[in-house]
Amino acid sequence: MVPTALDDAYKLKVNLRPAKFAYFFHEEDADALTQILRFVCTQWGGLRTILVPVQRDGSIHSFFAHLLRLADPDGFVGDFNGWNRNPPGIHQGTLASLQALFPGRTLHLQQMRWFREFDPAPHPIHVLTDEDRQSKSLGRYTLDNDFGKPWLGLALFGSIYPGQEEAYDENLTIADREVAVTSSAFWESQYVDDPFGSVLNLTAYGMRPHKVVGSTRTNSFNLVLVESPLDLCYYWNLRSLRESTQFDRDLGRRTFLVPAELLADRACIRSLGRFIQQNILYPNLHADVHIIATAWSDEKEDQLAAALGKCRLFKRHPKGAKASDHSWSGPKPPQNVDLDVSKLIYAPSVPRLPYEYYEGIEPQVAHRVELTLGTNEVLLQPPPSFRNRGYAGVGVDIECDVWSRYPKAQAVGNAIDQQARFSKYGLTNIRHVPETATYLAISLLDEWESLRQYFQARGYQTQLSKDGQYADALVTLLGGMPRVDLLASKEAYLLLDLLALRSTKKIAQRVAQQFGLKQEQLPDIQRVLEDVEVISELKGVTKTYRQLSQRQELQPYKGKLLGLMDELTRASVLVRGFYLHCPRCGAPDWHPLEAVKERVQCTGCGHESPLPVEQPKGSEIQWEYRLNTLVNRAMDQDVLPNLLALHHLTKGRKCSCLTTGLSLTKEAKEKELDFLFCFEQQLYAGECKAGTGLEEKDMVTARLAAELGIVKFYFATTAKFGDEAVKLVEQLRTDLKQEGVEMEVAMLSETELLNVPPASPADAPRVPPRFPPPTASVGTNMVPPTGL
């Protein structure tokens, strides 16, 4: 492995937030959904919970799978009736679906009945400041009609968990409110996003968005039609996502639940329109579409749109027209329509989702720290408003650019900080956090140890192959990976190839190829070559500049050959000297420049003789060149293509774990990746050739890479792959896509590795970039501690 040094300093900050959980239940099990909704009201962060209905085989709908990736939950909880018995296999199927979504994590799907006893999250009451506990009034809502669906009211307002009423009464003033679902108060109560507006809202106390990628600010309302548990989860998660990305605190909650039973009630739909008219306008925000009408299915979405279309307050957005949002900070906003006389514009559509988002208690300012391999202490300074009376488990995210050095795998995170994992925030752990400053210990791994942990978690032992040792030593000889540039040209590769001293195995292969012999005869040919003296021309021992400049392969580069040889000699890739025959014994002997004096000694018979001036007769003695022994071994073992591919792909990028010849052993079977490196916590690998062909075994290596979590695999050659090799790779791409394997497959040739201009535009390289861009039980939150 070619080590990469740590930076002088890194940006680091610590983020505190509630732990985020995802709950799974069978999509038709309304009772399980009801129990989950009751329980999340006991968790700080419960409003940000991800609700995931799963199908009978445990599969997850693509929409919820996307939300899970966005949320990156800290824990996974299943509430299945009969667990593994009814429906059969739903637990195993759900776990398998999750493992496919989070391949780098060690996943546990905890049973709800056990999780209730050992839930690490603080109770919402535990995190309130003293001032808020003494002065705030908490709204407790009930619906006058839930249409026989208790989960409706729970999803909107939550409820105090049975047995905890006294704890709430001791800490807050409770204001009971009954809401009629057919009145305007139903919409008004949904609009309230104040933490003390409802029991459910209280679970998001102190939370705020920190960063949002790919989402635009908008003042539009999202109306979600809800009829089934599946619909409710769609609404719940959309609401959570919007509030996790909404920076405007006084914008109000603008994701509304519309019970399917209200669609036929025109007065109710009219009151909804009037409420939106009164609250749609917001300073510095203007949307062309005031309402996004959405539902889980297209059919239900059409039903909601049809109900709005029957009310004169609404007008459908023209199909095909482009909707837009505007925000500004100047004193002159765009002209807003008078909504008292104009209609509300609605469009049936799926709300826009962000690419990424981050949230927590209070945004922290990153500071620069020096880090070293081994144990480091990081200061955790909780914000002044942070309270944790139950001393329960809180999400602690250490955000630092040093993590880009490590593969994103839970095994690696655990080795850095016990029970930690790499998340979208950085290095995440659920831990006891006091209200005062404390130090966190993290242990930075060296790069080889991080790879060892990564592959060991997948059942493989790692070691550097002989090829890898040659490559590492060659990089050291050159003076570092950037200096591989010296070898990354067609003329340099040809020169080294001409001077390479081939092993008897390589010579045997060449003889067999020349005379059309069978592969089975190779051992016999090699044995003969080892028993006899092989002529120097076959081995290509040494050559003078004049001899090299006359070689047909080097004719196109004759003008810069001498300069190239000068650079390679300075780098000790080439060694200068003489081959002289001893005048006494006649044995040829190599005399390197560093050992040459006016008198030379034969290493055979020990005879000393003067260094000749004339050799051959009539000519002055010429320098002869040969490869450094190490370089020769690298050429003989075809290590240079591996090194050139690694150099090309990592050049100018901050990569780590640069490895050639990575040997992987499992159950006494050994596999090898020609090269591997880490970029932005993702692993890339490849198979290298010096010729034009690929074989089926190379496709097997690529499939192994996919199983190991490699995100992109390269086939590379210092020549140009033939048509059959290209067909093999295309078939591999097709097969992987059909199998749902996300690993990309690419091909590199002499164009990239040796900077050879393509012969035709069709051979030019493609434009796309080189790279595609369990928790500890820390107590229960069910019963607030004494003294609250």
Image: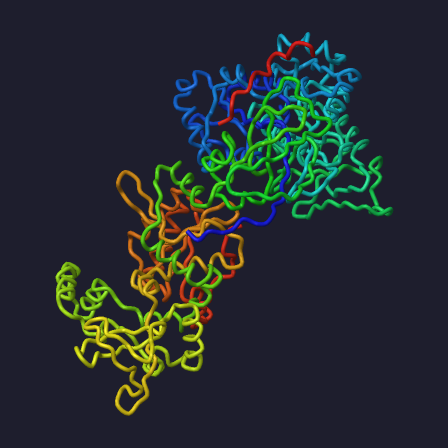
Residue at 44% from the left image edge and 79% from the top image edge: 560
Q: Is residue 640 above or below residue 237?
A: below
Q: Between residue 187 and residue 120, name the one nearer to us.
A: 120
Residue at 45% from the left image edge and 71% from the top image edge: 757
Residue 361's spot in the image, x, y percent?
68, 30
Where does the C terminus fall, quadrant-wise?
A: top right
| Residue 475 in view (yes/no) | yes
Quarter location, residue 318: top right
Q: Is residue 314 above or below residue 501?
A: above
Residue 460's spot in the image, x, y percent?
35, 40
Q: Between residue 296 and residue 669, name the one nearer to us.
A: 669
Q: Is residue 389 above or below residue 562?
A: above
Q: Is residue 448 above or below residue 28?
A: below
| Residue 691 in view (yes/no) | no
Q: Between residue 48 and residue 480, name the one nearer to us.
A: 480
Quarter location, residue 36: top right
Q: Residue furthest bottom?
A: 618
Residue 517's spot in the image, x, y percent?
15, 65
Residue at 51% from the left image edge and 26% from the top image edge: 775
Residue at 62% from the left image edge and 23% from the top image edge: 46
